[in-house]
Amino acid sequence: MMRTLVVAMAMTALAGCSGAAEEPPVDLLPGLYAVKIVGEASVTLDDRSDQGNICFSADNVVNFAADPLQRLVPDWPGCIATEERLTGNRLAGGRKCRMDGAKRGEGSMLLAFTGHHTTNAFAMSGTLVHGDHEQPGGPYIDAASGDFTITGQRIGDCP
């Protein structure tokens, strides 16, 4: 209970920082992170859960700011990462998805997020929006639109 409260307080403080783009850049430290996803959108961790511990190796943290979702959520078919110019400790990006054979507005999905990180924590909030994905005989993406938040706190070394 106390650990949950401490992590929640740390994430609240982290999420409250508005000047992440102006901060001197720092690298996320390798280690074991407690990660949690909350919200209405169908965004889950690689194991399809909304919380868990994820090990970030030295290789994972080098590219974390460029594409934080790569290590956190499963690949979605037909999706490409969207890139943004990053400064300081700001995180931003998303995914654009279109199923094979989909027409405009069908079988498509857009995910966008912003956030920031410190050496031992990260927080992102975003929105998932999909087009009309239930066309009879057409492409299908099983996803609920809505907002989401992903937080992570380093809790130690990887096993």
Image (spheres, rainbow, N blue to C red):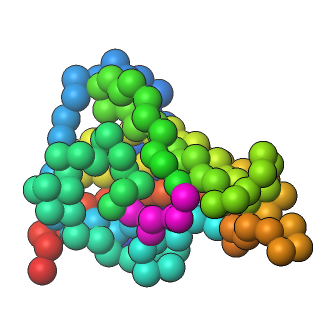
Q: Quadrant of the N terminus?
A: bottom left
Judge left or right: residue 4 versus residue 23.
Answer: right
Q: Is residue 60 above or below residue 134?
A: above
Judge left or right: residue 63 versus residue 83.
Answer: left
Instruction: Tell me where residue 8 appears, x and y as whole percent.
Output: 45, 60
Quick check: can you spot residue 37?
Answer: no
Magenta-drawn stretch contains 75: yes
Instruction: Tell me where residue 120 appears, x and y as whole percent.
Output: 24, 51
Q: Main secondary structure of the magenta part?
A: loop
Q: Is residue 46 above or below residue 76?
A: below
In front of the other: 98 or 31: 98
Judge left or right: residue 75 versus residue 54.
Answer: right
Residue range highlighted in magenta: 72-78
Q: Is residue 70 above or below residue 74?
A: above
Magenta-drawn stretch contains 76: yes
Instruction: Tell me where residue 6 appears, x and y as whole percent.
Output: 37, 62
